[in-house]
Amino acid sequence: MALCYPKISISELIWIWPIPLITSLWTLKRSKKSIFKGFGLAYLSGLFFFLINLSWLHHIHIASCILLSSYLACYFGIWGSFVATVGNVKNSNGSLSRCSSFMSIKMAFLNGAAWCGLEWIRGWFLTGFPWNGLGVGIVNELVIIQVADIVGVTGISFVIIFCSTIITSLIFRVPYEIKNSKLKAHPDFILGVSLIILMFIYGTNKLSKVPSDQIEIRTLLIQGGINQDEKWNPSTAQEIYKRYWDMTTPYLQLENVNFDLVVWPESSLPYSLYDQETQKYLNKILSINNFELALGINERVPQEGIYNSIVTLKNNTENPNIYRKTHLVPFGEYVPFRKSIPIVEKIAANSLGVDFSSGKKFEPLPMNLPEPYQIIPLVCFEDTFGSLARKFVRDSPQLIVNVTNDGWFKESAASEQHLTNAIFRCIELRRPMVRCANTGMTCLIDECGSLYDRYSSSPSGERLIHGKDRSNTFLRASLPETIKIEKSPKTTIYSRIGDTFSIVLGLIAFIASILKWYRSFKGN
């Protein structure tokens, strides 16, 4: 499973990896301990996966990698308990090889529902960490993943487990039928293939549609490539100001090109928005030409706190439009329980001096060039939360703007993994995205999750600051590009109902577990 994600990205394995795990869970000796054995086996699988997949966390601290992986593996463990008991095809007649197609479909549905529900819980429980769900593993299968605008990325995970369960069942049944000259039709296989075909038809239809009425926004994205050791060092502050000036102003002074939107990454400038030097600097750069600047910057507000914000400015700093990050990173932007538990405060004071405050509003930011549209603002890993992004959707032309800083994780897989998770927000909401990183993957993504200009007769390749070489995330470069947004975008089903599909399936799996437990209890 770990091979399905960046930097390896062998997406085909996403359909295969569950088979040996399901096989192991189904072939456990049936006893009262099956639920615990199933948990232990799947937990170990999940632990090894996350230790590999999240190995980049060691750049912060090796303990964070181990502890987070140990926690996330619990979801694998719970699913393993479910598959070994409730979702086991041996429930019908005790035989894997003589299971019916109906039982295969039933167990495939339940196992997929359980995984889907657990992924959804992982996305919100204890502030949530939806990073690298199964659906993210097939991000390069652009046609298949278009269905995310209905079921979300967790809904795609259901399809993967559903099909993998059916394949596992067939592996046991077909050899038995051949051996006994009783080869049968397999409606479960036909159903699985039909499901993939339907997704393919749906995706092809979505990718083939060309919006008729669009706004073209000439954008300039700036990737400063500032090392974390320099970013908050007072001695390098002037150098950082100069770097953004030198990387931005030559484009603003071009005679034949007028930029509408300039984007700087998360916490781009070393001092607060209301610092006098910052204000003077921003007013000077805003006076060069008629454009709008969207930048990630910290706000220090007296009597309120410090906010990690996206600010949009035009002409000067007098009337800023501001979004304050609502979903803060535990232990990165705040320490849980530090105010209520004294010992936590003592520990936190050494690692994180002051907590950031969280914003409360989910309002898009108004923009006016070249004509009115709105920005859906997402800071850092907020672009991994579909449930958060959908709160900004309105019946207006909209562009997702994500500012981030992945410099903490050096040149690891984290930056590209972050991008692959962000891509699904474009599909779920059918809104394009400009993504600006201090270090990481600065790019433009269209409403179908593509890094390519699909509407051009002569595609210029990936609209990515790295081109095709994604290994170096510490590039310093500017990306001038044009992105198009629909004037009358439709509101997707996912935007309206969110993760309802995953929640309902999770409830079905939970009810099936309760019924299984009740029958076992009644039988005893």
Image (cartoon, rainbow, N blue to C red):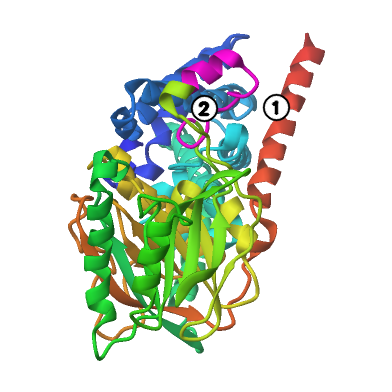
Comparing 343 with 102, the one in front is 343
Find residue 21 and report its image quarter: top left
Is residue 187 highlighted in magenta? no
Residue 431 seen anywhere in this rendered image of the structure: no
The tag on residue 96 is 2
Relative height, residue 261 to residue 352 (above, below): below
Q: Position of residue 435 (x, y in %)?
A: 38, 61
- Residue range in magenta is 331-348
Q: Position of residue 1 (x, y in %)?
A: 36, 36
Residue 218 seen anywhere in this rendered image of the structure: yes
Relative height, residue 523 to residue 16 (above, below): above
The extreme bottom residue here reads 256
Q: Main secondary structure of the magenta part?
A: loop
- The kind of residue tagged 2 is Leu
Q: Position of residue 417 (x, y in %)?
A: 35, 46
- The kind of residue tagged 1 is Ser
Q: Which residue is at 62% across, 17% downward? A: 341
Q: Which residue is at 45% across, 18% downward? A: 41
| Mark 2, other Cα within 10 Å: few <14 / some 14–19 / many ≥20 | many
Find residue 207 and report its image quarter: bottom left
Comparing 228 with 420, the one in front is 228
Closest to the camera, between mark 2 and mark 1, is: 1
Q: Is residue 45 left or right of residue 442?
A: right
> Total marks drawn?
2
The tag on residue 297 is none
Which structural element holds mark 2? loop
Which structural element holds mark 1? helix
The tag on residue 513 is 1
